[in-house]
Image (spheres, rainbow, N blue to C red):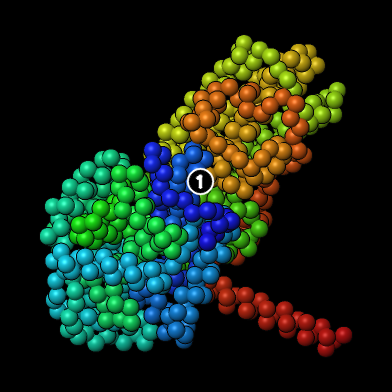
Amino acid sequence: MAAGDVHRSVKLPIPGKRNILITSALPYVNNVPHLGNIIGCVLSADVFARYCRLRGYNAIYMCGTDEYGTATETKALEENCTPKEICDKYHAIHRDVYKWFNISFDEFGRTSTPQQTQVCQSIFKKLMENNCLSEDTMQQGRVVEFGDQCEKCGKLLNPTELVNPRCKVCANSPHIRATNHLFLDLPSLEGKLRDYISSMSVVGSWSQNAIQATNAWLNEGLKQRCITRDLKWVFYVWFDAPIGYVSITSSYTHEWEQWWKNPKNVDLYQFMGKDNVPFHTVMFPSTLLGTDENWTLMKNISVTEYLNYETGKFSKSKGVGVFGNDAKDTNIPVEVWRYYLLINRPEVSDTLFTWADLQAKLNSELLNNLGNFINRVLSFIAKDPGSGYNSIIPDVAGAETHLLSKTFGDRIGTCVEQYVEAMEKVKLKQGLKIAMTISGEGNAYLQESQFWKLYKEDKSSCSIVMKTSVGVVYLLACLLEPFMPSFSVEVLKQLSLPLQLSLSDEKGDVEKAKRPWEMVPAGHRIGTPAPLFKELKDEEVEFFRTKFAGSQADRAVKAEAEANKIAQQLKNSKVSG
């Protein structure tokens, strides 16, 4: 079921159309997602999925929680319950957080399903038949504090390579024992894999960080990778988790092969943080290539670096930073969170979340630039006759010959073309910046036209300026919908226009952007204008900075101390009363 969206009818690839399959790295179910996780995977993929729909492409967005592996069992031991209870609890938490963030999945599933078992086993059988698996003995300890991947460099480690391993639950050194395991024979697949990488990284214009991480792996020489585990769940998480994309699609439609075994008609776009790259450019493609079946392999990979928090790193395990449920509790609207995370998206290097920066961007970019432009235009149109247009869009003639508006229209048209170009390449931050320059251009156009004077001195020119500006307001609702859907809904409500935005080439929408005066029909009555953003004040910023300092555990202790203090005060006042 889609979070934040009603369930639509199932979409299947349409011959002759652009069919786009979008996935974001499956969030792990042992904690609440923090803002770094959200921008790294689900939010970035959501922006692209919404953009594709706006363009009239046939796109589906698949995601869900990753529920197998050591960390789930560890968490279950910590919380004294079964792995299934952990998965159910955190799946619901994830789903609710993403729903609040307006993430428009076509399906948000989970990997603990019969479909997952079925798809996983059929891939496994094919690899067996094709002699891509071999059996070997491996030294293995069990619940070890340090996982299988180095947080700093992304290198995968075998348990025996860990220095001073300790159990995460009891802190003792694990007992290492030899067990038999199955290994994926990566060296035998290297030729196919290299062919795939060298062609697709060019066709899909992979980002520099994705290419570097992949080459680092290839240059080190591919080794056999263990795919089984001594756990209740047999497959090792790196083998199992990416197959989740397929099984979640098979929960969405039993005709899932039309998406996943249709490389000629479907483009696969995958979103993730940089620590996930090798699983998607080396492991998962090798697994699929080893089956000799006609899989839809990833075309485009969009990778983010890390979003850091104030003075250090966001950390799920240590509870440092702002988490999904915290964002909701601040009462800062969701569109502000989405905007801030996306304008700060760590595309080429790590970026920093700070409360002061959030405040600056909200107050200057959203409030004074974007909100101000829209409000000026709609408020003026809404004014009573004699000082405005009584909420009715004026009829205009000769807009093409009104030099200021014609020049402005050409500039807007160019911006829209640049926006499309950036978004097609999944340069989301650039797309957002271009859309925001349009409202800056709009403010400059209003100033230069001096419309308030024109109203009295040259009403027909004033009408051209207003009809052009209201067209740009509509256009901004369009371009910003992928980034801030709730903002667009509100703008359309104030424009009193239906909630159907489009930026499709077939309908000539991009071409039309050069003539913004044609966007909203004459005689149309707008709704009631209202401010779109609220200022964030210094004292609020200070409050949040203090509130979210330290770790979640520190905060819980602090909250308990506060509660006890209040309870004590109440008790005392009752006694003295």
Q: Position of residue 435 (x, y in %)?
A: 53, 35
Tell whether 535 sits left or right of 261.
right
Question: Looking at the image, which residue is at 49% across and 70% down?
Answer: 91
Secondary element under disc 1, as helix, strand or loop, is helix
Q: Please provide percent x and percent y for residue 434.
A: 50, 34
**Which residue does the image show at 34% across and 85% down from the upper left?**
171
Residue type pointed to by label 1: Arg
Residue 212, relative to residue 144: is it above or below?
Answer: above
Residue 16 rendering spot, x and y as whole percentages? 38, 38
Q: Residue at 69%, 47% (x, y): give it.
A: 534
Nearer to me, 160 or 413: 413
Q: Which residue is mark 1?
A: 50
* 23 with respect to 235 (left or right): right
Is residue 52 rendered to the left or right of residue 539? Answer: left
Give residue 121's position: percent from left, percent from top.
28, 70
Instruction: Kindly tell me whether residue 446 is visible in this rendering.
Output: no
x 45%, y 41%: residue: 57
Front position in the image: 202 or 375: 202
Q: Residues within 10 Å of mark 1 (few under 14, many from 20)?
A: many
Q: Is residue 462 above or below residue 37?
A: above
Vertical order, 357 against 376 (above or below): below
